[in-house]
Image (spheres, rainbow, N blue to C red):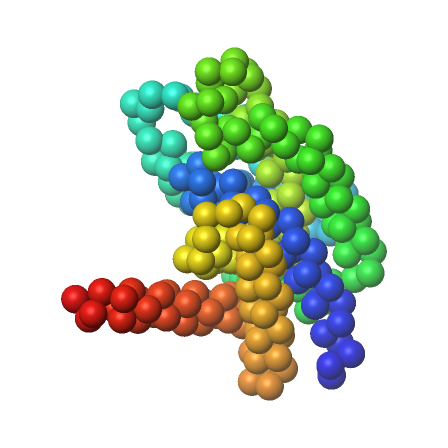
Amino acid sequence: MLSLLILPFFACLILTAIHTYLGLHVIRRGVIFVDLALAQLAALGSTLALLLGFDLHDQEAYFISLGMTFLGAAFFALSRQRREVIPQEAIIGVTYAVSAAASLILLDRVPGGVEHIRSLLVGNILTVSHEEISKTALLYVVVGIFHWVCRKPLMLLSFNPDQANTEQLHPRAWDLLFYMLFGLVVTSSVAIAGILLVFSYLIVPALISLIFTEDIRIRLGIGWGIGFLASLIGLYASVALDTPTGASIVCAFGFLFFIFVIGKWGQNRRITGGL
């Protein structure tokens, strides 16, 4: 049985590697739910592909899903303003709600729609293949290289936007690149892991790391450790309890988040003398 978990575990590791880093950007930008919105747009694209007669694993389905995600990425980049009249998070929330509703409408016309909803939410990482892992890992390496080469403007826009604006780095263009790369990652991740698991890998490790430090490099290391630990716990629980793998890993992330938040609360109470 444990041999069946080797490939899913490697898939979890590559998800941890890229999503923890992107999560640091997302949290600092204050667009926590952008991952959910783009993932839901990717799911809407997959649903449209099903309605058009393609299988979810067909290349055509992937590109339709990617196209929907790119449209959302461009919209988020172009709608971001230095002085916001409408909060960016509100725009993201509306996009998520509308794309989710549209997916439900389309799925109502697809045979086996309920099963597709389940697959889109928690994925089926237990059946991930060597080919899927190799393609996904290669894609993430390419995205990582782009982030490294363009690290100065991308980091400034996320962690010091005022300085980015004063240096005239064309923020909207760099935002577009960030969201496009982000959408590319999300589309590929949702295909193997589902919306909820992708969101957990993106947000939970980055949030927990924020409890300990503001240093980006240390936070990245802590986030990777959290992703590794949650993957182990979730995969083990799915075997021991015979539960869905993706949902088990999401619950493992929730468990770790609860433990660290309570631990930090208890530490603060001791420091302040229980006040």
Nearest the viewer among 249 and 221 is 221
Quick one: 170 or 196, which is closer to the camera? 170
Q: Residue at x 69, y 56 (%)?
A: 14
Residue 111 in sight here: no
User: Residue 66 location in percent, x, y?
Assistant: 65, 37
14 horizontally vs 214: left or right? right
Quadrant including the N terminus: bottom right
Q: Residue at x 27, y 66 (%)?
A: 271
Picture quadrant of residue 269: bottom left
Residue 59: % across, % down = 76, 43
Is 258 drawn above or below residue 43 in the view shown? Answer: below
Residue drawn 32% across the image and 69% down it? 267
Residue 61 sits in quarter:
top right
- Residue at the limit of the structure toward the left, as seen here: 275
Which residue sits furthest bottom?
240
Is residue 16 visible in the rendered image? The answer is yes
State whether residue 171 is above or below residue 146: above
Q: Position of residue 190 (x, y in %)?
A: 61, 51
* Quarter placement of the C terminus: bottom left
Residue at 73% across, 64% down: 10
Q: Position of residue 193 (x, y in %)?
A: 62, 58
Q: Nearer the viewer, residue 167 or 119?
A: 167
Foreground pick, 196 / 10: 10
